[in-house]
């Protein structure tokens, strides 16, 4: 439809049309001066432009949505892979060769570590068993130590008691020996006194107990030939019979003893000083003429007691532990 501006009829359609064209062709004042036709045209133009813009925006939004959907699909494909597995696994199935190598290395390391872990686990189990055994052993040892220390305490106390008893008994025995010696000495003194005061005493025969032999003015007990004892036990036997081992003071007496026993203990021992000799009555040996030739020789440094020598009517020093016959006197 032809529109007329400023009195001129012009075609709206055709080459070179533009909404600004009227302004270029005539000043604004001329459009205003025309009728509302001018405004309607302008409004129509604006509506047209608006519609065009809406179409354009809708088209663009649609495209953007399409691209967005495609992108999302792609991302999902990338993430899930073809068979719905995570993409990393697909990548592991067919990874690049350097990744394969790394994977193999890591797999080997994993296997080695797993083997080490197994070994360590076994070792740990074994150690746990050992530990349990050790704990039990430790408990048993502790118990034993406790019991042993208890026994030791008891034994120590017992030992102390026995030591005290032994000391007491030793003291008692020494006191009794002294008493005995002094009683014997008193008896001998009284006998001498009696003999001196009694004129008939010289003719009085001294009586000896049965199984004792009288020789001179003394009684002698000669041990049975079937019995042998060491020095200490021989002396004990004499004492139990009321006498002591014989003290030989004369050749006559020595020969008398020798005729009854070829070898026998006599009451003579080495003194504490290691050199002199002492009789059972406590007197020191003065007369050394009865030693056998070459004696006492303290053979092997252990001969502290004296025997009637097997070789002659003489004395020989021998170890006190030897077993011989013995001769007592009273
Ligand atoms: C020999 C000698 C003695 C010694 C005895 C010991 O007879 O050497 O002096 O006492 O052996 O058996
Ligand atoms: Ca000797």
Image: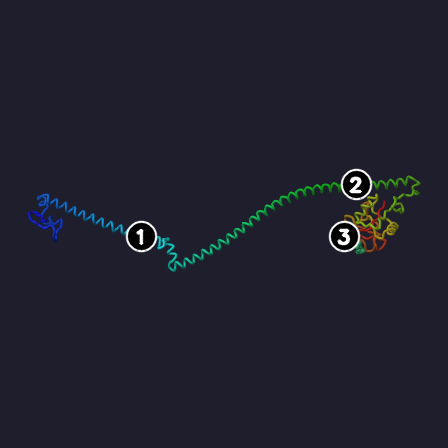
Q: Tell me the SS state at disc 2.
A: helix
Q: Where is residue 265 shown, x and y percent of the image? A: 82, 50
Residue 23's disc is: none
In the depicted view, which residue is nearer to us: 261 or 136?
Answer: 136
Which residue is disc 2 drawn over?
176
Q: Earlier in the sequence, mark 3 or mark 2?
A: 2
Front residue of 240/201: it is 240
Q: Is residue 205 above or below residue 85?
A: above
Disc 3/disc 1 C-alpha distance (Å): 118 Å
- Crowd band around label 2 with a 10 angstrom C-alpha radius: few (<14), some (14–19), many (20+): few
Task: Tell which circle, 1 or 2, labels the residue nearer the N-terminal end.
Answer: 1
Q: Residues within 10 Å of mark 3 (few under 14, many from 20)?
A: few
What residue is drawn where x is 61% and y is 44%?
A: 143
Q: Residue visible at 73% across and 41% down?
A: 165
- Of badges 3 and 1, the one in the foreground is 1
Provide the residue designation for mark 1. 73
Evaluate if marks 3 and 1 touch, with contact meaning CB atoms under 8 Å apart: no
Mark 2 and mark 1 in contact (Cβ < 8 Å)? Answer: no
For label 1, count other residues whose C-alpha is less than 10 Å away and answer few (under 14), some (14-19) or many (20+): few
For residue 302, the mark is 3
**Sequence-wise, which precedes: disc 3 or disc 1?**
1
- Left or right, 252 with respect to 131, comes to right
Residue that extends furthest to the front in the rendered view of this protein: 83
Query: What whole-number distance in Å separates the C-alpha atoms at marks 3 and 2?
Result: 29 Å
User: What percent of the width, then of the height, locates residue 181?
Assistant: 82, 42
Q: Secondary structure at mark 3?
A: loop
Badge 1 element: helix
- Looking at the image, residue 285 sits to the left or right of residue 137; the answer is right
Quadrant the C terminus occupies: top right
């Amino acid at each position: 439809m032809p529109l007329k501006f400023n009195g001129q009829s012009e075609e709206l359609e055709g080459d070179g049309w533009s909404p600004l064209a009227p302004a270029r062709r005539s000043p604004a004042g001329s459009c205003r001066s025309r009728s509302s036709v001018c405004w309607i045209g302008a409004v129509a133009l604006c509506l047209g432009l608006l519609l065009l813009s809406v179409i354009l925006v809708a088209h663009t939004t649609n495209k953007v949505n399409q691209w967005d959907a495609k992108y999302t699909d792609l991302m999902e494909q990338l993430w899930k892979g073809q068979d719905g597995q995570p993409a990393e696994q697909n990548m592991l199935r067919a990874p690049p060769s350097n990744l394969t190598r790394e994977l193999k290395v890591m797999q080997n390391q994993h296997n080695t570590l797993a083997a080490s872990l197994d070994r360590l686990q076994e070792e740990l189990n074994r150690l746990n068993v050992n530990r349990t055994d050790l704990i039990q052993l430790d408990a048993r040892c502790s118990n034993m130590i406790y019991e042993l220390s208890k026994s030791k305490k008891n034994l120590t106390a017992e030992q102390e008691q026995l030591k005290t008893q032994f000391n007491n008994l030793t003291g008692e025995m020494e006191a009794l020996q002294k008493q005995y010696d002094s009683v014997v000495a008193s008896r001998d003194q009284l006998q001498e006194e009696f003999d001196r005061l009694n004129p008939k005493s010289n003719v009085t025969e001294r009586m000896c107990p049965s199984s004792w032999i009288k020789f001179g003015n003394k009684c002698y007990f000669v041990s049975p030939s079937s019995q042998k004892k060491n020095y200490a036990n021989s002396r004990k036997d004499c004492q139990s019979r009321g006498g002591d081992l014989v003290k030989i003071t004369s050749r006559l007496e020595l020969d008398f003893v020798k005729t009854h026993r070829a070898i026998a203990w006599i009451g003579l021992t080495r003194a504490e000083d290691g050199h002199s000799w002492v009789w059972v009555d406590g007197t020191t040996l003065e007369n050394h003429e009865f030693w056998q030739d070459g004696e006492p020789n303290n053979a092997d440094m252990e001969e502290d007691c004296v025997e009637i020598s097997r070789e002659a009517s003489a004395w020989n020093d021998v170890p006190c532990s030897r077993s011989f016959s013995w001769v007592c006197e009273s």
